[in-house]
């Protein structure tokens, strides 16, 4: 029976990102399986948030994202031209929306420190999901991830040593059995892995039917641009030519599996907008609800879940794709360390501990938006109050910080304010940024005071922890920073100040041992794992 270190079910952005992270972590045999024959071009998420852009910047992919955003801005300008606006000027900065209430960038306090740590990644956001999937598929192939399409996972059985997996080709040919040390389900909201492994999936049932499409329309001049609340629901028109979205609050669809017809989309648009718009063709269309659920634990033995397989919710606020990329970044290096024998599998328990609270917040964040979108008097009264708040600097800044994800942190030991947060993209004395130093997917000790003792302690971990001695003129108060492979700060220290007592509840040794086990040699021999060099990007 063919054996893999890790099998990943699902080759969407989350599964592909996880495959890349596993290979960077030194996992030799990674298989990603996918039912679809090609990248799914169905219109889905239209943007990424700051943590996602930052994560991809840390893997050297920012130029690819910037090019996709440039192309998206060209489409935005085209829509403005056909809608009677200025298609040649600089488009207004996109600040997002909350429950279809547009946020104006003019009210955003751009000087808020929460926005300053992302570096150039903070300027990239308009990256559609299909484009991101193509970028990650190319990177996965470069890193040696084995990607098999036109197969779906139909069975699994796990024991103490691994998971036996059954794969069925979509052409009806004979199923194949293979063996994996670990299995990760990144196979979406209707995850086969989640169901077969028996994960508990509590939550709240859906109450809406929504449609999103890129379509050819007659009568579209009668539609408003942006988001509009009506007596029967909420709709959006733009910011790309032909893009429409409608939401009705009369319960979920009777059947979510049948393809959306032109007639079905047209009827919903007419009911919600009150405009006799005619749909002549759909180039991409999807149906969605606000089914809102989350598994209680992201791990069951040797089976783990990430992305929509672990949590589902309405798409408002564009949180789903970004939440899944965060899952993949958090899980990838931890699972790689376990596979390589450099950490006990208890390290994987921190995956649920760190990601579940953020997922739970996203579920409530989307539930709150559904409550504000309901076409009934109490919700509309509350919507007016929230709209007033969005016309203030404090209100808009608060909402944008939440939407952009810059608030996210993990509850890690240590008193330094950077611990548990995404590491700031420090500008280093040699002209590089911190993100440039994380392309290899390893941890990094940043020594900013030429401290040989710190370097020796981190250097004992071999290829698990890179060490860089430099200075950071913009942050003279910092003396050292330990950054995990996912870019989050595990430990930090400031320069000593005369007369100011040093609060150091967690030492570098504590942080190194917590996340990377014992130093090289001892840890590998004790765990019985073989050392493998991590793949390098050119």
Image (tube, grey):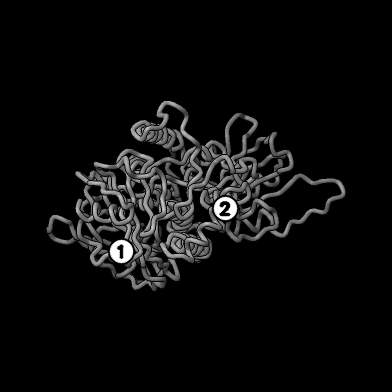
- Tell me the quarter of the picture where residue 155 sits: bottom left
Q: Residue furthest top?
A: 88
Up/down of 234 relative to 121, above or below? below
Where does residue 37 sit, x and y in percent of width and height? 21, 48
The location of residue 461, given as percent across then percent down, is: 57, 50
**Numbered tag placed on residue 517 in the rendering:** none
The crowding category of the residue bearing disc 2, from other C-alpha atoms within 10 Å (few below 14, some 14 to 19, many at least 20), is few
Which residue is under mark 2? 388
- Where residue 241 appears, as percent x and y from the top left, is 32, 38
Q: Are marks 2 and 1 in contact (CB under 8 Å)?
A: no
Q: Nearer the viewer, residue 75 or 203?
A: 75
Outermost residue on the right side: it is 499
Q: Is residue 434 toward the left or the right of residue 267 in the image?
A: right
Q: Specify whether residue 97 is in view.
A: yes
**Position of residue 469 in the picture relative to residue 229 (left or right):** right
Q: Residues within 10 Å of mark 1 (few under 14, many from 20)?
A: few
* Relative horizontal placement of residue 56, taking residue 248 as reference (left or right): right
- Residue 255 figure quarter: bottom left
Q: Which of the 4 quarters of the picture holds residue 480? A: top right
Instruction: Give percent across and percent down for residue 421.
Output: 60, 52
Can you say which quadrant of the picture contains the C terminus? Answer: top left
- Which quadrant would the N terminus be assigned to in this image? bottom left
Answer with left or right where residue 64 lies relative to residue 214: right
Q: Residue at x 35, y 66 (%)?
A: 162
Image depth: mark 2 or mark 1 in front:
2
The residue pinned by badge 1 equals: 190
Check disc 1 and report its element: helix, strand or loop. Answer: loop
Res 528 seen here: no
């Amino acid at each position: 029976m063919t054996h893999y270190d890790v099998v990943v079910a699902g080759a969407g952005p989350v599964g592909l990102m996880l495959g890349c992270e596993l290979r960077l972590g030194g996992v030799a045999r990674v298989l990603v399986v996918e039912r679809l024959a090609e990248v799914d071009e169905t219109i889905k998420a239209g943007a990424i948030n700051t943590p996602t852009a930052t994560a991809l910047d840390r893997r050297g992919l920012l130029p690819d994202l910037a090019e996709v955003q440039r192309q998206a801005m060209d489409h935005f300008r085209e829509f403005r031209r056909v809608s009677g606006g200025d298609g040649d000027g600089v488009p207004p900065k996109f600040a997002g929306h909350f429950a279809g209430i547009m946020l104006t960038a003019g009210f955003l306090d751009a000087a808020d420190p929460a926005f300053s740590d992302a570096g150039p990644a903070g300027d990239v956001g308009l990256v559609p999901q299909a484009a991101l999937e193509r970028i990650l598929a190319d990177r996965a192939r470069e890193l040696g991830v084995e990607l098999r399409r036109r197969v779906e996972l139909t069975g699994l059985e796990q024991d103490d040593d691994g998971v036996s997996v059954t794969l069925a080709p979509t052409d009806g040919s004979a199923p194949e059995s293979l063996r994996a040390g670990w299995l990760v389900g990144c196979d979406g909201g209707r995850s086969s892995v989640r169901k077969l492994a028996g994960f508990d999936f509590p939550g709240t049932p859906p109450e809406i039917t929504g449609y999103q499409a890129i379509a050819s329309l007659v009568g579209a001049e009668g539609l408003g641009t942006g988001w509009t609340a009506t007596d029967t629901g909420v709709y959006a028109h733009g910011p790309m030519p032909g893009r429409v979205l409608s939401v009705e609050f009369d319960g979920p669809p009777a059947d979510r599996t049948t393809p959306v017809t032109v007639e079905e989309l047209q009827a919903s648009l007419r009911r919600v907008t009150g405009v006799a718009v005619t749909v002549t063709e759909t180039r991409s269309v999807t149906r969605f609800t606000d089914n809102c659920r989350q598994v209680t634990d992201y791990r069951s033995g040797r089976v783990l879940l990430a992305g929509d397989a672990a949590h589902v919710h309405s798409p408002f606020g564009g949180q789903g794709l970004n939440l899944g990329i965060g899952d993949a970044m958090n899980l990838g290096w931890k699972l790689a360390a376990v596979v390589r024998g450099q950490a006990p599998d208890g390290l994987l328990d921190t995956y649920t501990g760190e990601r579940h609270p953020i997922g739970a917040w996203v579920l409530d964040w989307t539930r709150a938006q559904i409550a504000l979108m309901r076409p009934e008097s109490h919700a509309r009264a509350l919507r007016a109050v929230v709209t007033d708040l969005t016309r203030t600097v404090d209100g808009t800044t608060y909402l944008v910080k939440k939407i952009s994800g810059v608030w996210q942190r993990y509850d890690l030991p240590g008193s330094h304010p950077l611990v548990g947060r995404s590491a700031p993209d420090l500008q280093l004395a040699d002209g590089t940024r911190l993100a440039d130093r994380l392309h290899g997917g390893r941890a990094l000790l940043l020594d900013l005071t030429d401290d040989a003792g710190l370097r020796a302690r981190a250097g004992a971990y071999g290829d698990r922890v890179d060490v860089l001695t430099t200075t950071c003129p913009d942050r003279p108060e910092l003396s050292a920073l330990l950054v995990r492979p996912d870019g989050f700060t595990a430990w930090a220290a400031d320069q000593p100040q005369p007369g100011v007592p040093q609060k150091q509840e967690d030492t570098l040794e504590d942080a190194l041992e917590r996340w990377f086990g014992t130093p090289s040699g001892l840890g590998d021999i004790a765990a019985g794992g073989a050392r493998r060099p991590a793949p390098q990007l050119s």
